[in-house]
Image: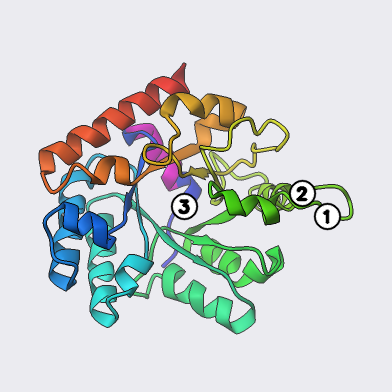
């Protein structure tokens, strides 16, 4: 089965629902805040509540695989159901697994998340290119074949990322800029938007020295708990702001388990983002 390309589907979802991406991050502290046990039952209740509350209104969910994998096979089973339920409700799923390896191992990671026959099949996958961009080729190829997408770590919001991503190559270009250039090449001639995006932190301030106009989506963590606001987006992303997919996790999830409160919080963020990027 080959789907319509991810970039096309994401553009349509962003235009109809707004660009907000809500993380599904069931870490122990958040489960406790919801008065849930840090066990399979709590994990399942948390995930189902988030999907029930938001699947018909937000464009994208971004489950963090590690918070499910820590429970072993039963946790992975909950993740499979979460992905299936979200996609059945019409929400795109970006699996935040940050996979990165070489050769047959990278191909296996890609198959786990980008093969439509897999129970974990997601609309897109976060990947790490720091074994060399070429190491991602199995994932790039399978994404193209299946109509899925990738989000490649380029300029991340964690402070430690700069020591790698802003390091200079012999040609004077930074590693982060090199990754952006690779993605622009992947997205060449795609319309209305390419399927190969970058992860670029919304907390990074002025990025005018980087060419973010890659004709693909820019997944932007950092809104809410990490300190960035919707109003910061135009200053960070410039003319590429229309393709930004701002990710909010704790800022929305802290309002659970009340479904109405989750919806209200997501709606507020969505309205603030719309006002900022439409100005």
Residue range of the region highlighted in magenta in the rendering: 9-16
Q: Does the CB distance between marks 1 and 2 fall below 8 Å?
A: yes
Query: Which numbered mark, 3 or 1, is in the foreground of this view?
Result: 1
Residue at the image position 72 percent from the left and 47 percent from the top: 177
Of the two numbered discs 2 and 3 on the same chain, state the one appearing first in sequence: 3
Residue 263 in view, yes or no: yes
In the rendered image, is residue 154 in sight? no
**Residue 164 x %, y %:** 69, 56
Residue receiving disc 2: 174
Q: Residue furthest right?
A: 171
Pointer 2 local density, CA inside 10 Å: few below 14, some 14–19, many at least 20 = some
Residue occupying image coordinates x 24% and y 39%: 57
Look at mark 1 in the image and give the residue it sits on: 169
Q: Residue 10: say if magenta.
A: yes
Q: Position of residue 88 (x, y in %)?
A: 23, 57
Residue 142 coordinates in the image, percent (x, y):
54, 69
At a point 69% along the width and 54% down the height, the residue shown is: 163
Left/right of residue 170 with respect to residue 279 in the rendered view: right
Are circles 3 and 1 on residues that touch, CB within 8 Å? Answer: no
Give residue 76's quadrant in the image. bottom left
- Dot 3 corresponds to which residue? 6
Does 149 appear in magenta? no
The reply, left or right, for residue 21 in relation to residue 29 is right
Tell me: 48 left or right of 75. Answer: left
Dot 1 lies on which element? loop
Query: Which class describes the residues within 10 Å of circle 1: few (<14), some (14-19), or many (20+)?
Result: few
- Mark closer to the observer (2, 3): 2
């Amino acid at each position: 089965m080959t789907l319509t390309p991810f970039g096309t589907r994401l553009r349509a979802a962003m235009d109809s629902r707004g660009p907000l991406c809500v993380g599904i991050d069931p870490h122990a502290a958040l489960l406790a805040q919801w008065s849930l046990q840090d066990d399979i039952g709590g994990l399942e209740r948390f995930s189902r509540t988030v999907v029930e509350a938001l699947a018909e209104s937000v464009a994208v969910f971004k489950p963090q695989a590690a918070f499910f994998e820590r429970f072993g096979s039963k946790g992975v089973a909950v993740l499979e159901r979460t992905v299936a339920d979200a996609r059945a409700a019409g929400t795109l799923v970006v699996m935040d697994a940050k996979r990165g390896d070489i050769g047959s191992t990278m191909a296996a990671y890609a198959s786990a998340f980008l093969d439509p026959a897999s129970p974990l099949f997601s609309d897109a996958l976060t990947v790490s290119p720091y074994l060399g961009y070429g190491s991602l080729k199995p994932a790039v190829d399978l994404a193209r074949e299946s109509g899925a997408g990738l989000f490649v770590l380029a300029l991340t919001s964690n402070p430690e990322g700069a020591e790698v991503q802003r390091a200079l190559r012999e040609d004077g270009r930074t590693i982060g800029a090199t990754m952006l250039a690779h993605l622009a090449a992947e997205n060449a001639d795609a319309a209305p938007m390419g399927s190969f995006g970058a992860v670029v932190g919304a907390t990074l301030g002025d990025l005018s020295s980087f060419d973010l106009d890659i004709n693909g989506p820019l997944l932007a963590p950092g809104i809410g708990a990490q300190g960035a606001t919707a109003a910061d987006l135009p200053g960070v992303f410039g003319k590429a702001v229309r393709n930004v997919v701002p990710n909010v996790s704790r800022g929305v999830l802290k309002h659970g388990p009340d479904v109405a409160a989750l919806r209200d919080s997501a709606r507020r963020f969505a309205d603030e983002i719309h006002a900022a990027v439409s100005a």
